[in-house]
Image (spheres, rainbow, N blue to C red):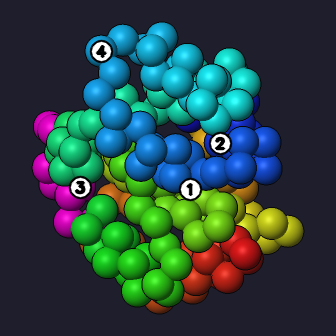
Amino acid sequence: MDKALQTMIDNMPTKTGKSLDEWKVILKDKAFKKHGQAVNFLKQEHNVTHGFANTIVTLSKEENKSEDDLVGAQYNGKEALRPIYEELLAFCSNLGNDITITPKKGSVSVIRKRQFALIKPATKTRIDLGLKIKDKPTGNRLENSGPFGTMCTHRVKLTTTEDVDDELKAWLKEAYEKSI
């Protein structure tokens, strides 16, 4: 997801009164045949500006694919990476009851109030785990964010389930704790 889109999603509750997930629930109950009908509905019935309405409808369409379909597509041809993903997900899910897991087309966001981790199968042999930990120095393993840009502050490259070790779990916990 690009920086502008992430900023728009982050600002959505303030600017529209609801989070993206709340808007998705509203649209899920409607049966619009065309994109423009859904956009007009949000503009007319909920006073959402055109830019936000268009973004909400577009991202809601992505949501129509099941989470399993989205994750399955990410790991198609990269099946050896799936156990790493599952281990990361299991750990993150146990950090607190305020976690939201949001699969997208090419990655999975792990969100508290804000995204604090991003799981992306980068190659056939590697997952890139993006973390958002402000003011944390980089090191040999905890690299700068690289291709994640400003969505994350750091990146860790994972090739086996053994890479999901105590050090990595401590970084995930720190990112979770700082995401309030």
Give the Cα distance between marks 1 and 4: 37 Å
Mark 1 vs 3: CB contact within 8 A: no
Query: Residue 81: which disc?
Result: 3
Mark 4 or 3 closer to N-term?
A: 4
Q: Would you say 76 lies left or right of 1 here?
A: left
- Residue under label 4: 33
- Residue under label 2: 9
Q: Position of residue 21 (x, y in %)?
A: 50, 51
Q: Would you say 177 lies left or right of 80 here?
A: right
Numbered disc in front, either 1 or 4: 4
Q: Where is residue 179 in the image (x, y as percent from the top left)?
A: 70, 71
Helix, strand or loop status at disc 3: helix
Helix, strand or loop status at disc 4: loop
The segment highlighted magenta reads: 74-84
**Is residue 2 among what the camera can see?**
no
Tell which residue pokes out farthest to the front in this image: 45
- Residue under label 1: 130
